[in-house]
Structures are given as structure tokens and as C-alpha cells.
Amino acid sequence: MAWNAGVLVEEVTTLGPGLASVVCPEALSLMPLPGLFTALSFLMLLTLDIASAFSLVEPAIATILDRKLGAKRTRVAAWVCLAAFALGLLYTTRAGLYFWTTH
């Protein structure tokens, strides 16, 4: 990509959301069979996100279940996921990028 643009590599790559949403798709479009590699990249990111969601939610559910012995797992899981969804909505607003990059 840097060679095609005639700039240094440091000027092409970025950190943060620009890497996954700008640089990676551009790099994938320059590869042979770009559709295949784009689909594989999407599936990789999807499975990575799902695995990350499980690793974030399960400890919270286990902690609540350990504290409240009579709680049902499905209800606790629903409330934890609902709370995480509500917090995640913050990142869909204009303030989301600010919170992601500065905090």
C-alpha cells in the first residue's frame, strides 16, 4: 500500500479504529482474490468478537451467581448482556470515538 501511494509505511498505517476499518480493507483489496480474503477476514473478526464477548460476560455471570445462590443463570445472563448492550450503545454515538481513544 505504501509503495502504491508513494509514501512511507508509517504514513499509511494507523492505530485504533482506522486500522481495522481503513487500512485492512485497502490491503485486502490489493491481494489476489480480494473477495475471498475479505470474507475470510470478516469471519475471523466475527469469531474473535464473539469469543471476546464470552470472555467478558462469563466472569460477570459467575460472580453474580456465586453471590446470589438462588439466581437463575438465564436471567442473570440476560441482565448482564442487557447491561453490556446498554453500555455499548455509548460507542455508537459521536462521543464513542472520544471514549475509545482517550479512556
Image: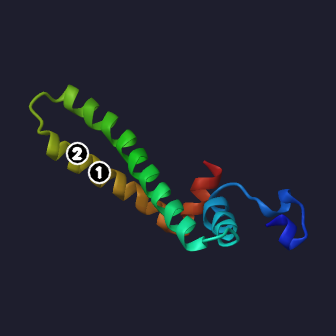
Residue 90, image x, y percentages: 46, 61
Q: Which mark is residue 81?
A: 1
Amino acid carrying mark 2 in the image: Ala
Q: Quadrant of the N terminus?
A: bottom right
- Above or below, 100 against 70 in this view is below
Residue sitting at 90 percent across and 66 percent down?
7
Q: Please tell me which residue lies in front, 28 or 66.
A: 28
Q: At 80% from the left edge and 63% from the top edge, which residue is drawn?
A: 12
| Along the line of sight, the residue nearer the viewer: 70 or 5 | 5
Residue shown at 84% from the left, 58% from the top? 9
Q: CA distance from mark 2 to mark 1?
A: 6 Å
Residue type highlighted by circle 1: Cys
Disc 2 marks which residue? 77
Q: Position of residue 26 (x, y in %)?
A: 68, 70
Q: Could you tell me if the residues under marks 2 and 1 are in contact, i.e. CB atoms within 8 Å?
A: yes
| Residue 98: image location, x then y, percent | 61, 59
Helix, strand or loop at label 1? It is: helix
Total numbered badges shown on the rendered structure: 2
Which residue occupies the foreground of this view, 38 or 19? Answer: 38
Crowd tier of the residue under label 1, counting other residues whose Cα lies within 10 Å: few below 14, some 14–19, many 20 or above: some
